Image (cartoon, grey):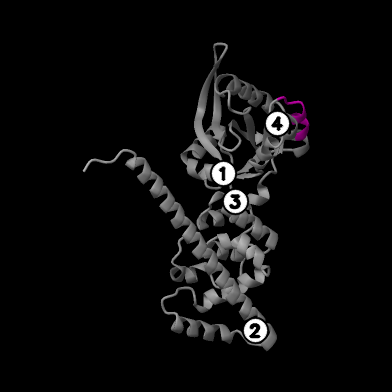
Amino acid sequence: MPTPEGYADWLVDLKTRIHTAQQRAALAVNRELVLLYWQIGRDILARQASQGWGAKVIERLAHDLRTDFPEMKGFSRANLMYMRAFAEAWPDAEVVQQAVGQLPWGHNLVLLTRLKQPAQRLAYAQAAIEHGWSRNVLNIHIETSLLERTGLAVTNFKERLPAPGSDLARQSLKDPYLFDFLDVGKEADEREIESALVKHITQFLLELGAGFAFVGRQVHLEVGGDDFYIDLLFYHLKLRCYVVVELKADKFKPEHLGQLGFYLTAVDMQVKAEQDNPTIGLLLCKTKNKVVAEYALRDTAQPIGVAEYQLVESLPAALQTSLPSIEQIESELGDGE
C-alpha cells in the first residue's frame, strides 16, 4: 500500500505529541508522589508533636503500609524517615508544589542530605529544574559548591557589555574553577593543564557550566602574516558569543590582559559571524590579587573575566547527616536519577 501524501509529516507530528504527553504524565505522577510523601511526613511530624508518639511509630507505620500496599515501593522505615525530614525541611506546601515537587524523589534526598540551609536547597533545586541535572550531576555540583562560586569572577562586563547580557555573562563565569579531576601535579605548566583539560573535556564542560560548547584547542589565527594560537576556544549557546580561554600557571599580571584582548579582537574580526555577540575572554590564573585584577580591567576595552583555578580539592567535605544513607533505599526507589 503506497504511503498517502503528507502521512510521514503527520506521523512525525503525532510521535512528538505522544512523547510530550508521556513526559507530562510522568511529571504529573512525580509531583503527586512527592506531594504524597510530604503529606505523610507532615502527618508524622504533627502526630509526634501533639500526641507524643515516639520513633517506634515509624517502624510500625512502615510495616502496616507495606502490608496494605505491597505493590508500592517507598514505604520502608528509612524512606518514611526521609518523608518526615522532607516535611520538616519544607513546611510550606506551595514550595513543594511549585519547586521541589518538580524534582524526582531521589533529587530531593540529595538536597536533604547534602545541604542544611533552605535557601541553598531551593537554589540548587531551581538550578536542577532549569538545567535538567541528573541526580549524580546535582550531587557533583553541590559537592563542588557550584552555585556559591557562580558569578564571582572579576569582570568588566557591566562596563563593556549591554544589559541584560552583561549580567548573564557575569553569571556564566565562576571563581575559582576546580580542576581536581585532572591527573597533573600542582606545578604543571599551561600546556600540561591545557592538554589534560581537553583529555577530560566532558568534566571540563561540566565545570564550565551550562551553555559552553567546545570549539578547539590551540586554534590558529593569522594576523598580518604572523601566526597566533588561542589556548582554548568555546562558543556559549545562551550568550551567543565565542569565549576565548587563556591559561596562566602563575599569579595574575596586568600584562596578561593585553594578549587576551588581542585574541578577542582577532576572533571578532575573523571568526565571529554577524549575528554573534562580541567575543568575551576568560583568563584562568593560579592565583590573583582581586584589586590588581579590578584595576587592570578598568582600562581594558574588551569584555574579560579573571578567575583562579585549583588543581586539587580544597572545599569542605560533604555534610554528615543522621538520616539513613541514600544507598539504603536506592533499590527500593527504583530511580537511578
Dot 4 or dot 1: first in sequence order is 4
On the image, numbered disc 1 is attached to which residue? 210
Can you tell which of label 3 and label 1 is closer to the viewer? 1
Looking at the image, the residue that sits furthest to the front is: 4
Dot 3 or dot 1: first in sequence order is 1
Residue 129 on the magenta span: no
Q: Residue at x 43, y 50 (%)?
A: 17
Three-letter amino acid code of the residue under disc 2: Arg
| Magenta stretch, residue numbers | 294-301
Quadrant of res 227: top right
Q: Main secondary structure of the magenta part?
A: helix
How far from the left and from the top, in percent, is residue 51? 67, 88
How far from the left and from the top, in percent, is residue 209? 58, 44
On the image, numbered disc 3 is attached to which residue? 313
Q: Residue at x 53, y 42 (%)?
A: 205
Looking at the rendered structure, the secondary structure element under dot 2 is helix
Q: Residue at x 73, y 33 (%)?
A: 156
Three-letter amino acid code of the residue under disc 3: Glu
Can you tell which of label 3 and label 4 is closer to the viewer? 4
On the image, numbered disc 2 is attached to which residue? 47
Can you tell which of label 3 and label 2 is closer to the viewer? 2
In this view, 259 is above or below 98: above
How far from the left and from the top, in percent, is residue 286? 64, 39
Dot 2 or dot 4: first in sequence order is 2
Could one spot residue 337 in this view of the protein?
no
Find the distance from the CA under tag 4 to the CA under tag 1.
Answer: 20 Å
Find the distance from the CA under tag 3 to the CA under tag 2.
Answer: 44 Å
Looking at the rendered structure, the secondary structure element under dot 3 is loop
On the image, numbered disc 4 is attached to which residue? 161
Dot 3 or dot 2: first in sequence order is 2
